[in-house]
């Protein structure tokens, strides 16, 4: 093995370790006061305080043309249960309850983020 | 002389068309493979093997043509306009990064070139996702996508190195 290859392997491993640390931090970061915000095309369309949800319900969000996503809101968690896109990445992401990773649906330009916030009463549609 | 030139350029054209077809088929088959990871943007990137095979022996614009054709046709077949933007931004970033990396490192470090390509492919995709979704929070996917890029990049890079060894016995790339 040449010296060049050894350096490259070292660089790769170093990168891998650093990235794993970052991932670990992001994955384990927890958010209190779970407020889910649903954005479509950059616009905030729903803002839901997940802790205040009593009974599970679904919201249908229509995109352009035939596209739609069906979002299910449960107590403490939110997820997309049905989507018109073929890849279904957003559905496969399942339900999120806290943490920093947003649920995204790239074809329909939809993004669901969980944000911490002050305790508040809102459970409203902002549209 | 002119006939010789013509036959060699014809051979090149056929070879490049063939490579485009191969990468397109890989691209379409890959889209059908379900992955256990559910983070959007993670994929194997097997179609990049073709780009890696060509990058040493062909001119930049020829490899770029194969890549762009594959992206256009691939999104046509998958039937999504959004796929086109994500693939294109990723593909262009990947190609530029790999060209530079390959120039510095030369042939026997193709596995590393592949990793660099995969890293920049995902950077390009995150940038375009931030632009389309108009959200900064997509950045939290960054370390996960980078880890996946290192693993899949290594995989495709080693595969490409092995294929090149075999293929050079069958097809003479040097005109």
Image (tube, rainbow, N blue to C red):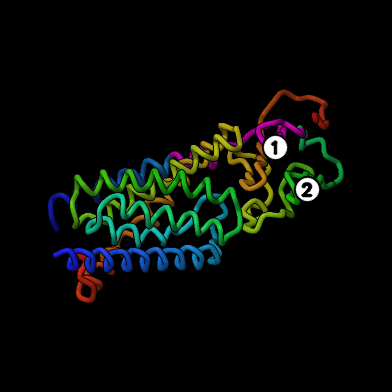
Task: Please identify the residue farthest to the front as the structure is shown.
Answer: B2
Relative to B60, is A1 on the left or the right?
left
| Image position of A2 with respect to B125: above or below | below
Residue A18 location, x and y as percent? 37, 40
Which residue is at 17% across, 67% downward? B4
Toward which corner of the image does residue B78 lie, by quadrant? bottom right
Q: Are marks 1 and 2 in contact (CB under 8 Å)?
A: no
List the residue tagged with mark 2: A72
For the residue pair B106 and B139, the one nearer the viewer reads as B106
Residue A40, disc:
1
Query: Which one is in front in this view, the residue at disc 1 or the one at disc 2?
Result: 1
Left or right of residue B23, residue B57 in this image: left
Task: Give the vertical position of A33 relative to B123 (above or below).
Answer: above
Residue A127 part of the magenta-drawn span? no
Q: Magenta span has A32?
A: yes
Q: Quadrant of residue A100?
A: top right
Which circle's residue, 1 or 2, is located before the other in the chain? 1
Q: Position of residue A44 (x, y in %)?
A: 72, 31
Chain where mark 2 sits: A
Q: Residue furthest right?
A: A55
Write the start and end of the magenta stretch as one range. A22-46
- Numbered circles on residues, count: 2
The chain holding disc 1 is A
User: Which residue occupies 43% across, 56% down?
Assistant: B69
Same chain for mark 1 and mark 2? The answer is yes
How busy is the neighbourhood of tag 2: few (under 14 within 10 Å), some, or many (20 plus)?
some
Q: Is residue B71 left or right of residue A118?
A: left
Which disc number belongs to residue B100? Answer: none
Task: Determine the secondary structure under disc 2.
Answer: strand
Q: Position of residue A17 (x, y in %)?
A: 36, 45
Q: Nearer the viewer, residue A82 or B27?
A: B27
């Amino acid at each position: 093995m040449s010296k060049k290859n050894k350096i490259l392997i070292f660089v790769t491993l170093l990168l891998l370790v650093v990235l794993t640390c970052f991932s670990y931090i992001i994955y384990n970061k927890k958010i209190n006061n779970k407020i889910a915000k649903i954005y479509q095309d950059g616009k905030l369309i729903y803002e839901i305080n997940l802790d205040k949800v009593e009974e599970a319900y679904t919201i249908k969000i229509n995109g352009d043309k035939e596209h739609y996503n069906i979002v299910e809101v449960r107590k403490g968690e939110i997820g997309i249960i049905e989507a018109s896109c073929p890849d279904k990445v957003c559905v496969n992401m399942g339900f999120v309850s806290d943490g920093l990773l947003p649920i995204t649906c790239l074809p329909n330009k939809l993004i669901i983020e969980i944000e911490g916030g002050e305790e508040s009463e809102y459970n409203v549609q902002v549209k | 002389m002119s006939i010789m030139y013509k036959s060699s350029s014809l051979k090149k054209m056929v070879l490049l068309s063939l490579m485009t077809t191969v990468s397109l088929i890989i691209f379409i088959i890959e889209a059908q493979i379900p992955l256990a990871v559910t983070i959007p943007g993670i994929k194997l990137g097997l179609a990049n093997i073709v780009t890696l095979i060509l990058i040493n022996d062909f001119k930049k614009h020829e490899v770029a043509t194969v890549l762009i054709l594959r992206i256009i046709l691939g999104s046509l077949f998958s039937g999504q306009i959004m796929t086109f933007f994500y693939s294109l931004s990723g593909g262009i970033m990947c190609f530029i990064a790999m060209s530079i990396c390959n120039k510095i490192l030369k042939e026997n470090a193709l596995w590393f070139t592949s990793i660099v390509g995969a890293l920049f492919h995902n950077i390009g995709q995150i940038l375009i996702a931030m632009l389309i979704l108009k959200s900064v929070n997509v950045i939290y996917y960054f370390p996960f996508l980078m880890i996946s890029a290192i693993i899949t990049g290594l995989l495709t890079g080693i595969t490409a190195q092995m294929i090149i060894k075999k293929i050079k016995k069958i097809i003479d790339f040097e005109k």
